[in-house]
Amino acid sequence: MQRRLHRTAGRMAKMVVLATAVAVLFSLPALGAGRVTMLGTWGGQELEAFLKVLEPFEQETGIEVEFTGTRDLVAVLTTRVAAGNPPDVAALPNPGQMVELAAEGHLVDLSKVLDMQTLRSQYAPVWLDLGSYQGKLYAIFISADLKSLVWYNPKAFAARGYAVPTTWDEMMALSDKIAGTGATPWAIGLESGAASGWPGTDWIEDIMLRTAGPEVYDQWVAHEISWTHPAVRKAWEIFGQIARNPRYVYGGTTGALSTNFGDAVSFLFTEPPRAYLHRQATFIQSFILQANPNLVAGKDYDFFALPPIDPKWGTPALGAADMVAMLRDTPEARALMRYLASPEAQQRWVAALGKVSANRAVPMEAYRDPLTRKAAQILVSAQVFRFDGSDLMPAAVGSGAFWEGILRYVGGEDLDSVLESIEAQAQDAYGR
Amino acid sequence: MRRGGAWAWGFTAPALLLIGFYLAYPTLATIYLSLLDRQSQRFVGLRNYVDLFSSNAMLTALRNNVLWLVLFTTLTVGLGLALAVLTDRVRYEAAAKALIFLPMAISFVGAGVIWKFVYAYRPAGAPQIGLANQIMVMLGREPVGWLITQPWVNNLALIVVGVWIWTGFAMVVLSAAYKGIPKELLEAARVDGANEWQVFWRISLPVMQSTVAVVATTMVINVLKVFDIVYVMTNGNFGTEVMANRMYKEMFQFRHFGRASAIAVILFMAIVPVMLANIRRFRQQEATR
């Protein structure tokens, strides 16, 4: 009995030692300086590109960046923030999220971290404003996507004698002409998993800017005008003239609703093409090349700016951007933020993905192909630039009722009832 | 030995603490949160509940949960029962049962993704990439937007996925019960001139009754929690919303903690009676043993 007790005690002591050793071993990397945790949505090609961006940083500083990618960023971030375990740095999905996090006090004021003077010289004021909340800078933009583009297949256009339209009416006339031959002019894909519907919101936003102008657009985004306002209604109707017309859209409304946003563009490159026009942001280039690696930019695929509707408002540019914010103030996180704010890092990022830079210090030569350069030029020269409105609205509207509304409207529901239900959601979400 | 008192408490304390920490506390905290506002700061009374029951999305979710409840439970239990009895009569029973049970090993998210491919839609004339529509085309029909067409086609399409996963489970449990029926009982009935149909309805089923009830209640609880399939395949769009998905949206997308908690409480309330029925049945069974 006595001896057994001894043996048990000895075994227990051994286990305690072992457990302590294991615990120390696992906490070592946490103690040792040189680690940053980062959360973002990137996966696949984007993740590869981002890891390449990080390479020089990790080599120079010896700081290891632990990047976690998740398509469900908001859920993961919400949970981790609520649990008191936020990542050091996060790539936020949109300014709306940033404002919510900043308002709750979870973000670090970047003016303490970055040289504001340099930032002001490199970024247009609009970008700094979009990254600020109540006068403090909370996020920087490492790249931008230009959304107001219509992609087409120049060879198919040439073969059939179609000209690139320069006004909305010309574009609709072209659509009619294509539909008249028994073909379908538009490829639309609204499916995007849990985010289905978002491609339609870009349409509405672009049309709003072209029919109502930037001031009304801003009022709409801030919910100073109702969703049932005639200007909003009109934008939806113009969208509906294309999206709800089965003669215009490949596969009709069922096709638009069930096609993934990344797949729709490939209908332009079949022989014969199943569709001729596709409205989508700059990022779609990587999808085009993924599905058809042999296509050449500018020859096999190209884009034109979504034409103006009301000449009064010209050709405004709608865009979105990748933004990075800091949630924990550590020396390593500061170093990473400084690096990501640099033109060198951003140059690597945009060059790898065919994105456009928001940073003026990134040279035009950084773009690997003439198309991206063209997009950058449209972005820089646009009289009016507006950020993707759905990204600025509270999530319950911008990534909730608005997305859902698009699907319901394209699915055939009456416009009034769609707009009324978005309005009801908006009154609830904005009025807090 | 002294009985009861401190010793009893001492021995039950770990269990009580665990239950308190993992069950009672979260339940009470959720009920409390459901009475607070979006950021859990101000008391709003029953407003979250009123809002929920007056929102279209939530009413659709309720309707669909009832639809799931009826169809999913009937189909899993019905098919499970039929398969349990039928596989019992074939030589390749093990293989057949293994095949039917297999989907159980697939996660719901995985099953959702697989079936999303099965239901994939391409317009007529284009090569179909989804199995379901390829079959339609081979039968000379138009392809169908399985996940788009409201309100029956898409909800049924989703329920089929759930049934595909869970039928195996129902079958295995019911099969065990079926094999537990004394063979003399069935033989006696047959000797008395009962046909197979009568044997099943008059002998087998009544004997298995309690197992069927247990499987059915398990399915009911499963179905009230259904989330993954809907989230992955439609995210509740096109009138396919269910309560658990709504809860996820309110919580993680819209960051409305009050409403999300209120949905959790509603789900909890709906499950409690089923649980109680289950427990009572269990007690009765124990008593008659």
Image (cartoon, coloured by chain):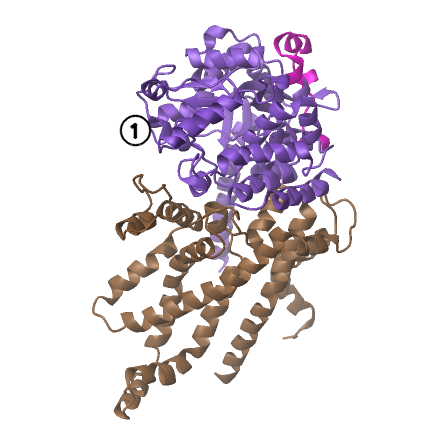
User: Which residue occupies the foreground of this view, B180 or B136?
Assistant: B136
* Res A114 → quadrant: top right
User: Which residue occupies the foreground of this view, B206 or B140?
Assistant: B140
Q: Is residue A424 magenta?
A: no
Q: Could you tell me if residue A36 is visible in this image?
A: yes
**Residue lying farthest to the left in this orientation:** B91
Amino acid found under the numbered disc labelled 1:
Pro
Tell me where the magenta segment starts and ends, as one range: A101-128
Chain A colour is purple
User: Which residue occupies the foreground of this view, B102 or B155?
Assistant: B155
> Residue shown at 59%/23% (left/top)?
A324
Residue of label 1: A272
How far across and down, in percent of the image, does residue A52 sit? 44, 18
> Residue shown at 55%/42% (left/top)?
A409
Please determine whether, in this image, residue A100 is positioned above or below residue A340: below
Please determine whether, in this image, residue B39 is positioned above or below residue B217: above
How far across and down, in percent of the image, does residue A322 sit? 55, 23
Magenta stretch: dominant SS? helix
> Residue shown at 41%/50% (left/top)?
B146
Query: How many callouts does the rendering have?
Result: 1
How far across and down, in percent of the image, does residue A192 sit? 48, 37
Q: Quadrant of the C terminus of chain A?
A: top right
Chain B colour is brown
Q: Could you tell me if residue B26 is visible in this image?
A: no
Please determine whether, in this image, residue B194 is positioned above or below residue A151: below
How far across and down, in percent of the image, does residue A175 sit? 44, 28
Q: Is residue A119 magenta?
A: yes
> Residue shown at 62%/25% (left/top)?
A211
User: Which residue occupies the foreground of this view, A423 or A127?
Assistant: A423
